[in-house]
Image (tube, rainbow, N blue to C red):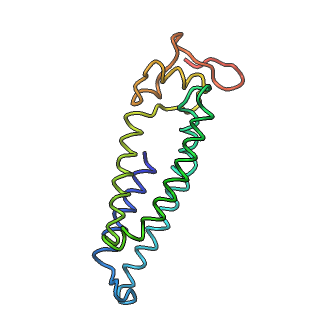
Amino acid sequence: MAGAFAMMVCFLVYSFVGHFALDRANPANSPAAGAVLITFSCLFIAAFASTWGPLVWTVVAELYPAKYRAPAMAVATASNWFWNFMLSFFTRFVTDAIDYLYGLVFAGCCAALVLIVFFWVVESKDRSLEEIDTMYLRRVNPRTSARWSDEKGERESGSQGEKVV
């Protein structure tokens, strides 16, 4: 959620500075705006590369039962390629129409990511795939899933087999 929030802030700053502060006819007239755009582009890359870039694949791999995991990953990968192509194809047309405000679309998507993770993705840290499957089957509340334990009130912790209560 922190990564999505950070990316949203970067998109908001980028969109508003690019639209309202940058002299698009002669960008050399607005060097401060250019510096802000470069800075927040780099901050966005750092936020994405350390959160949603790699971790979304882990979440997708953990969401599905073993029976459906491989086809689900295939669909996720195909979807990723498809939407990357669509975004790269249509970005020029959209930015010609609304210039830097295009970032507001992505800021809205990042805001939606925060809500989706908060309301629908269970905490899977230090859990086996079987435990994660069980959590989704039992419809464990994602907001309290970090404190969830199995019906015995305990769960295995790591390879040593020690019990955590």
Q: Is residue 60 left or right of residue 116?
A: right
Q: Quadrant of residue 145?
A: top left
Q: Residue farthest to the right?
A: 160
- Residue at 48% across / 20% down in the picture? 137
> Can the viewer see residue 17?
no
- Indicate the position of residue 50 as horizontal and vertical percent values: 55, 53
- Indicate the position of residue 100 as horizontal and vertical percent values: 35, 70
- Residue at 36% across / 89% down in the picture? 26
Where 26 sits versus 34, above or below?
Answer: below
- Indicate the position of residue 93 as horizontal and vertical percent values: 38, 70
Where 64 sits versus 109, above or below?
Answer: above
In-front residue for pair 62/79 = 79
- Residue at 34% across / 87% down in the picture? 25
In-front residue for pair 145/110 = 110
> Can the viewer see residue 15?
yes
- Residue at 57% across / 43% down in the picture? 57
Q: Quadrant of residue 91?
A: bottom left
- Indicate the position of residue 154 as horizontal and vertical percent values: 55, 15
Q: Is residue 11 left or right of residue 44?
A: left
The N terminus sits in image quarter: top left
Q: Is residue 9 left or right of residue 45?
A: left
Q: Is residue 50 left or right of residue 14?
A: right
Label count reads 0
The C terminus sits in image quarter: top right
Where 1 sits versus 104, above or below?
Answer: above
In-front residue for pair 69/3 = 69
